[in-house]
Structures are given as structure tokens and as C-alpha cells.
Amino acid sequence: MFDKKILHHYMTKHNLRDPWNVVELFEKKISKFTGSKYGISVDCCSHAIFLCLILLSFKKTILTIPENTYISVPSSIKLAGYKFKFKKIMWEGSYKIEPLNIIDSATKFEKNMYQKKTLTCLSFHHRKHLPIGRGGMILTDSKKNYNKLKRLRYDGRNMNKRYAQDNFKIMGYHMYMTPEQAAFGLKLFEKNKNKKAKKISYKDYSNLKKYKKIFKL
């Protein structure tokens, strides 16, 4: 799936020397399409949500999420150190993790979809509109959040510096997108950007309230 030839193609086409520049190119393409100033690629949407929760660090806040959603959402919330409750929410495409400005948009991908002052999380799962197989992105209009999330997703590192020359400022997580994945994402974006994404809603997900014992609610 992740053919090195695809990566080489985009590096040559855009005169890029470093493979990580292809990741930045993919982020810029997606953020421009969705209407956000910045995009931070990650390895999956679940980790995108997790990183946003770590970034905001409002752990005393009890979050509200739909009863019908993917099971990794409440799992990510618990792992990030938050408490949550389920609520019957009839959503389509995306929903907000109340009361924070985090939007789970794993099933929505449209032109100019970005809502200002939010952290919008995308999925590039193999069943989504850009089926990279594994991958996700966080959309934001805050440069401060952009810079911090870039370090959070890459072990606290600066992607533009070699390990020996880096100056660590925060603890991070191993949740980045590889150049090969980004190159494949660019190819899929060029193919699918004008196609309408399939509409997915709460009706497509199991009710997680019946698993209260798992989440110890």
C-alpha cells in the first residue's frame, strides 16, 4: 500500500529534500481544503482526540459524549484522565465533546467544514473518505495549539531537528503520521477531493451505555 515510489513522486514533484516535508505538504493540502489555518497529522483519529484532551488539560471537567459513537472515544477520554457521561445525541457526520471545543469529525470530510476556534479531529481509516488505512489529523486556527500539538504527537520532539541537536521542552507521545502514509494520503486526496463523502450518523454505531461496567461509570 505504502509504495516508496509514491513518496519519491511527491518529493520530486515539489522539489522536497526531506521526506517529512511530504507530511507537511499533506497537512497544508487538507487544512486548506477544510478551511482551517493549520493541520497536524497523527496516526489515527482516536489519538487525535487524546492529544487534544492532553493539550487542553481540563481534567476536572466532566465531558459529555453521545451514547452512539465509536468505542475508542470514551476509552481515549478515560486514558487522558477525564471523567465523562453518555447522552442521547442524534448527530450526523460530527459532534462536539461537550463542553470542550473538540469536535469528533471521524466520519465527516467536506470542503470548508472547519468551525472556527475548535480542535477538529479527522480519520483516514480504510472505511473513511480518504482511506489511507491508518491516520488522522487535527484542524486548528491557533498557532500556539499547532506548535504544541506538533511536539505532542512526535515524542515531544521538533521534527525539523536531528535527535542529538533537539532541545526537549515537553513530554510527548509516539503518535505521528509517516511520510509514506502522507504521500498515499496526497494521492487519495487528489482522487477523492471532489467526491461527496458518505453520510454517517449515530444510527451507524452501537449504544455504548450498555457497557457501563467497562468504563466503570
Image (spheres, rainbow, N blue to C red):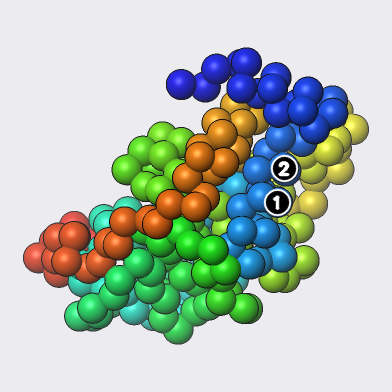
Q: Residue at x 35, y 67 (%)?
A: 93
Q: Which residue: 69% across, 70% down?
A: 141
- Amino acid found under the numbered disc labelled 2: Leu
For the residue carrying disc 1, how many other residues have a C-alpha within 10 Å: few (<14), some (14-19), or many (20+)?
some
Q: Which residue is disc 2 drawn over?
A: 25
Residue found 82% across the figure and 29% down from its top: 16
Q: Is residue 114 above or below residue 197?
A: below
Left or right relative to 124: residue 202: left
Q: Quadrant of the C terminus?
A: bottom left
The three-letter code of the residue at mark 1 reads Lys
Question: Picture coordinates of residue 35 (x, y %)?
Answer: 63, 67
**Residue sitting nearer the eye, 182 or 175:** 182
Of 175 and 32, which appears nearest the observer? 32
* Quarter of the view holding residue 106: bottom left
Q: Position of residue 182 (x, y in %)?
A: 60, 35
Identify the mark at residue 28; answer none if there is no mark: 1
Can residue 11 be seen from the camera position used here?
Answer: yes
Q: Is residue 47 left or right of residue 173?
A: left
Instruction: State how far apart marks 1 and 2 are (Cα).
Output: 5 Å
Toward the right, the furthest residue is 165
Q: How many marks?
A: 2
Q: On screen, 178 above or below 8?
A: below
SS at mark 1 in the image: helix
Decide if residue 208 is on the left or right side of residue 57: left
Q: Are marks 1 and 2 in contact (CB under 8 Å)?
A: yes
Structural crowding at the residue carrying mark 2, measured as other residues with C-alpha within 10 Å and reported as few (<14), some (14–19) or many (≥20): some
At x 46%, y 21%, the residue is 1
Q: Position of residue 214 (x, y in %)?
A: 18, 57
Residue 169 spot, x, y in % from top left: 79, 52
